[in-house]
Amino acid sequence: MKEYRILILGASYGSLLGIKLALAGHDVDLVCLPQEVELINKEGAIVRLPIRDKDKVIELRSTDCPGSLRALGPSDVDISTYDLIALAMQEPQYGADEIAELLKEIGLSKTPCMSIMNMPPLPYIARIEGLDTSKLDGAYTKPDVWKYFDSNYMTLCSPDPQAFRPPDENINVLQVGLPTNFKAARFESDQHTQILRDLQSDIENIKYDLDGDMIDLPVKLKVHDSIFVPLAKWSMLLSGNYRCVKEEKAVAIKEAVHSDLVRSEEIYNWVGAIATKLGAIESDQVPFIKYASAAESLIRPSSAARALFSGAKNIERVDRLIKLIATQMGEDTHLIDSIIEQVDRRLEINRGS
């Protein structure tokens, strides 16, 4: 097995991918805030993972992994030492001065970079033929931070596993709610794609001793040849996550989807049709019935909705990105306009405008 060194920007959601890579024997560094650096380096990262067929939740600790996992600040990173970089922060966070400077360094280094954000970086969108990315800037908090990247070195991984930091726990703890798989698109180059395929294989080979039984662990990395596979998440975001944002409160994803299943399916399929017109095929997509079933277990509001009702002045705007893409394609967007307007109103309240 070849051991890789991987840098992950973002210790919250990033610790889920990080601990799976460390369990597979790789060395992982997490870029995070000073208080996170101190706690993770002292006590390790902790990920609680449900094992459904055993009806148990196990606790994975980075200190018990065969590979290493450590935390560091942006100024302590030496890009030249890494084989792969993963972007696991929320899109607005990349506009912070210190992170933007690190992102510039990453882009100029031409180190293969995999985003696990809901919001695809502009260099990834540039891999889709026929789109004018200059007309999509309005969906991004600071679009200029992506200008140093060559799209050949950027791929996208759909962050399908649902996870959150329990509010009453230390910040090195992550609770997985929906233990689905990361779905990554290949890089343009076979050489860089091979890194992903190696990591996929190594994660699949992990065995965990649960009460004397050696079991497979959920949350795997799946690598796909189609660049459209990660875009299947878009339908879920528009029919579920962003519709958690109501006038006065945030509601659970389950409620957002199941309170009006007919409308949810209509939105879901409309977004899917946009992906199809961009080049996706049926096998790239997830059927609505499968998503609706998964949404039954999503009993918390989406991270975007929680952020908005906690006063966030910026969030990831995949909703607005899809509208801009659809408009560029000449599509009528009335089906999603009210969703976008609701998010806009909450942001205006938070910004005091």
Image: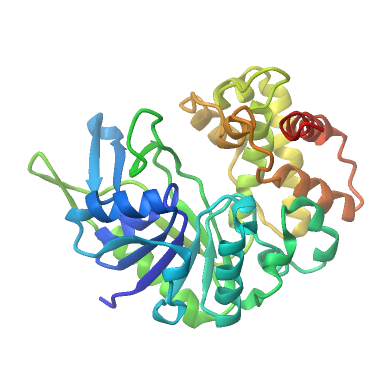
- Whether residue 99 sits left or right of residue 212 in the image: it is right
Which quadrant of the structure image shows residue 328? bottom right
What residue is shown at x 44% (from left), y 55% (from top)?
32
Q: Nearer the viewer, residue 83 or 194?
A: 83
| Residue 213 image position (x, y, % from top left) | 11, 44
Which quadrant of the structure image shows residue 172? top left
* Quadrant location of the N terminus in the rendered image: bottom left
| Residue 283 image position (x, y, % from top left) | 59, 53
Q: Nearer the viewer, residue 326 or 300?
A: 300
| Residue 144 image position (x, y, % from top left) | 73, 66
| Residue 344 image position (x, y, % from top left) | 78, 34
The reply to whether residue 16 is in sight is no
What residue is shown at x 53% (from left), y 29% (from top)?
295
The reply to whether residue 221 is in sight is yes
What residue is shown at x 82% (from left), y 67% (from top)?
130
- Whether residue 106 sits left or right of residue 182 in the image: it is right
Which quadrant of the structure image shows residue 25? bottom left
Q: How many marks?
A: 0
